[in-house]
Image (cartoon, coloured by chain):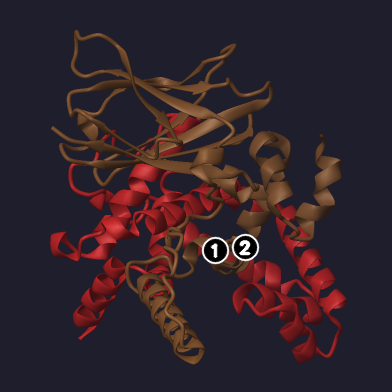
Amino acid sequence: MAEAATSLLDARFARGGRDAFVEAYAAHAREVRHWVRRFFSSAFEQEEAVQEVWLTAHRMQSLYDPAKGPLKPWLRALSANRCRELLRAASRRPPVGVPLDDVSDALWLDAPGPDDAVHSAALRVEVARFAAGLPPDEARVLQLCFVEQRSHAEVAKELGIDERRSKYLKQKVLLAASRDERLRALLSESRS
Amino acid sequence: MSLALFRERLEAGEVDAQVRAHLRSCDECRAHYDLLAQTARALGDDGAKAERERLFLNHPSPLVGEGRGEGARAGSHRRVLAIALAAGILLVAGVSLVLPPRATTPEVQLRGSGDATAAPFSLRVYGKDAPGQKVRLIADLPGAKEASVNPRAELQLFVKPAPKPGEVLLVELRAPLKSASLRSGPGDDLAPVGSAFGVGGFGPQARIEVCAALAPQATPTLAAALEAGSTQYCSTLLVTP
């Protein structure tokens, strides 16, 4: 059933149009983000590269042929190629762990990074510790703004505050977290 | 510019195109942005919402009605409507008219695309039809819009006039098998764009889309240039044996 839905989406994507592109984006955005992170350690560069990948996918939408294979490997190869081009354009070498050439449609990108699981578990512990030390209103803002991705209007309504206060509290929580020594150490470890 | 000028905007999450342009060239601000973004990610914000908004809300035009599906259908509906309207007017007036040919406008136009004939530069494609042969001018893009090249050809792009100091011409070559990004180098009147390349790598019967835009020197890619408001001019190189 899921496979049929996937191949339907692939065929729609090949026919073109905004709706199909938006659906393909919704289906594969998380994977593209994961693939791009293997090439860039900087969050800013990752964000730039993700935009580049999707804009390239949009430009090349008409060239995708579902008869030659599903959309996911096409996007994976496109992501790997675009990231390599961006690194080349900046005269930089790919990070250690990125093969020089792909012989199998960048299949290696689907595997988790060597320390992903360890860092995720350690981060969860540290974030829980950090959240436990926050005043109740800031802990609630952390949950609503960061975890649930609510807008400031929604957060303001939920907490009975105005939007400016919601923005202020979000900024306060983020700055406090960025200055937390243990969180900071773990983040710099995962960057390197 | 120092971090102090941008710190407040970064910390307030007000990262617009102007701030992003600065981040591309400022290591100090980028490091601060990275720390905040990675902290936000650790707290649970995976950046998906901002990414989606940036892709779809800030750049709606490339993602509207361009496909072979809905764009074409919308175009045909518009044509049917126009024909019906014209027929109605003719019937009411009772007069036979010969309609002038309708100006054809491309239905597919990428974000920031400009009229090729009005491009402020000429992208000269010089090349040899095969190794060892004489170099000749193959095409003058984007005005020519389309040119054919031999799969054995070796090409070198030049831009005329050379971009002004502080500017660069960014070119992207895109084909199903391969794509490449090129930047103009220094030059007085004619400036080289990237280095020489073989056409064969793009595939034996490829259709290479060549898009170019002038942008500030620090702009890393064509997409970044378009995002910052540059106009791109596109044309096609057909690889034909």
Q: Residue at x 49, y 42 (%)?
A: B116
Asked if the residue at tag 1 contacts the one at tag 2, i.e. Cβ–Cβ closer than 8 Å, the answer is no
- Please name whichever residue, B238 or A119, is drawn nearer the observer in this view of the structure: B238
Left/right placement of residue B191 relative to residue B238 reads right
Left/right placement of residue A119 relative to residue B201 reads right
Q: Residues within 10 Å of mark 1 (few under 14, many from 20)?
A: some
Residue reaching furthest to the front: B95
Residue B36 rendering spot, x and y as whole percentages: 69, 54
Q: Secondary structure at mark 1?
A: helix
Quadrant showing the N terminus of chain A = bottom left
Q: At label 2, which amino acid type do we have?
A: Asn
Q: Secondary structure at mark 2?
A: loop
**Among the chains, which one is brown?**
B
Labels 2 and 1 within one chain: yes
Residue B188's place in the image compared with A151, above or below, is above
Q: At label 1, which amino acid type do we have?
A: Ser
Residue depth check, mark 2 versus mark 1: number of the one nearer the observer:
1
- Please name whichever residue, B62 or A50, is drawn nearer the observer in this view of the structure: B62
**Among the chains, which one is red?**
A
Q: Residue at x 20, y 10 (%)?
A: B133
Q: Residue at x 53, y 21 (%)?
A: B160
Chain letter for mark 1: B
Chain letter for mark 2: B
From the image, tell me which residue sits under label 2.
B58
Residue B164's place in the image compared with B232, above or below, is above
Residue B97 rendering spot, x and y as whole percentages: 44, 75
Q: CA distance from mark 2 to mark 1?
A: 9 Å
Q: Residues within 10 Å of mark 2 (few under 14, many from 20)?
A: few
Residue B162 rendering spot, x and y as whole percentages: 58, 20
Instruction: Tell me, yes or no, if residue A34 can be seen here.
Output: no
From the image, tell me which residue sits under label 1.
B61
Q: Which mark is residue A165?
A: none
